Image (spheres, coloured by chain):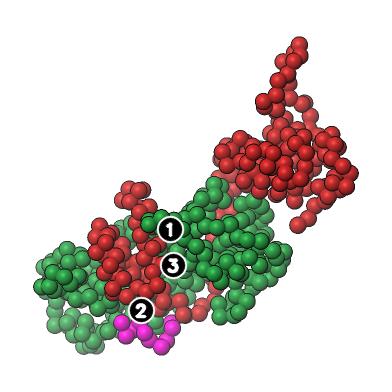
Amino acid sequence: MNDINRFELEEILHEFAAEPSHDVATLERYLRAHPAYAESIVDMSLELRLREAATVASAPADEAWLDSAWDSFQSTMAMAAALAPVSDPFAAASAKPLREVRAGLGVPSGVVEGFRTRIVDVATVPDRFLRALAWELNATLDGLRGFLCGAPRLSEGMSFKADDAPRPAATKISFEQLLIDARVPEEDRVRLLADGD
Amino acid sequence: MTPTPLTRTRRDGTLYTRRPEVEAVLGSLLDMPREDVLAALAVRDPRSPTYIPTECVVHLLRQTRYDNGDTYFGALYREVMRRADAMLPRVQGERIGERENVHAAAARERVKDAIDLKLSEDLHSPGPGLDYFEVMFADAVATLRSTSNRSFRRDSARTQPLERDAETNEPSIEVERAVGSLDVAQELLSDDPIYRSRVAAAIDSLPDNQRRVIEMILQDMPLDSSDDNVLSIRKVLDVVEKTVRNRRDAAILNIRETLGIGTTDE
């Protein structure tokens, strides 16, 4: 079965499962409407019947199986993260315009720019602010962290007039310094530097 | 906080939505500190008024894409898997090596792998892939199990015992007697939940062609019919009536053997 048919089949089976009743009338309706998938529809009908017969049995949770399931998922995710190329969350198609990000976070544009150019040292940024920024960018927290670990880069869309070619900053600055440089008032700095949920 | 709406649509274009009770619980969960959410997950009895619907746990798990701190994420992940496990045919400890349990254990692994895949895709690039699990978790798991079992069943069917050549073998008198004395529908209604789950596992471990005949018989569909308007089992499977009978008989013998019932002669 190719992927498109598989997708269509999954949709049909999900709709069948969501029917209020799984009596013979419902089964027949689906069998007549989708004869090409008759076998899978019958399989699904039985699946729902067996679930009803089997789930009443209360058995203690299989904690050993849950442990191994969790271990294997963690290693899969770690491997996927290691293999995934670091992408720029600011350039992603799903990212909001920067002015909305800035407004959402309640900070001046210089602060957002400090993250976009990676001049800020990610280790000095409170988790709460990082989470909020990831949310605003529609990025994952790990993805954003991975991006910020990269070397500082030049700001895009700005023109320079100098004798030498422009170079990105050589060293990173702390989040607090970034806030000071962006002229964030002290009371806002205190709020932004606070950590915790 | 209002939960973000689902984006998955049906084939007719209408949007899938969460059930109202799920929306309501989710609204309050999203405003709760994480410790309180984790404490609430400790309620394991689905009949308890404070039991959190699994659809809500799935939503919280998906939300962790913005922060998948291991402790919180791990607790939600384990809870989702714990509940998926509870919905699958049981792997009975005392009969762990038996055919139906080997089958149930393999099916559970495939469901876990399928959920893992959908979840990691959802965490990396948000999409409607897990929306079904927020509509009706149990149905989504059943669908996943049904689709993930397809190729596996085909591969394993030939290793099943009592698989006869359905086109030529005549059933023996013993077979006819055994078939006549086992009412599968009644067995599935047994008062004993453990026995009932064993009957379910026995049916589930049948080869494809036998299992499908059993389901249609359980739906009271006729084996065959001369009326063109009646959808018979023969018509659905596009085989001769004799084949339908043979598959039914082989299925019932297999179920009897799995359950250790024996034939009426024993």
Front one among B143 and B257:
B143
Q: What residue type is labelled 2?
A: Val
Label total for image: 3
Quarter of the picture containing the N terminus of chain B is: bottom right
Front one among B16 and B163:
B16
Q: Single out the mark in the foreground, 1 or 3.
A: 1
Q: What residue type is labelled 1?
A: Thr
State yes or no: residue B190 in magenta. Answer: yes
Locate residue A17, reporting x and y percent.
39, 67
* Residue under pointer 2: B199
* Residue under pointer 3: B139
- CA gap, disc 1 and disc 3: 19 Å
Q: Label 2, secondary structure: give it.
A: helix
Other-residue count near label 1 (Cα within 10 Å), few / some / many at <14 / 14–19 / ≥20: few
On the question of residue B33 being in view, the answer is yes
* Chain letter matching colour red: A
Chain that bears disc 1: B
Left or right: B198 with respect to B112? left
Residue shown at the point (56%, 71%) measured from the top left: B21
Q: Single out the mark in the foreground, 3 or 2.
A: 3
Range shown magenta: B185-194
Overall secondary structure of the magenta section: helix
* Chain letter matching colour green: B
Sequence-wise, the earlier of marks 2 and 1 is 1
Q: Which residue lies furthest to the right in this view?
A: A186
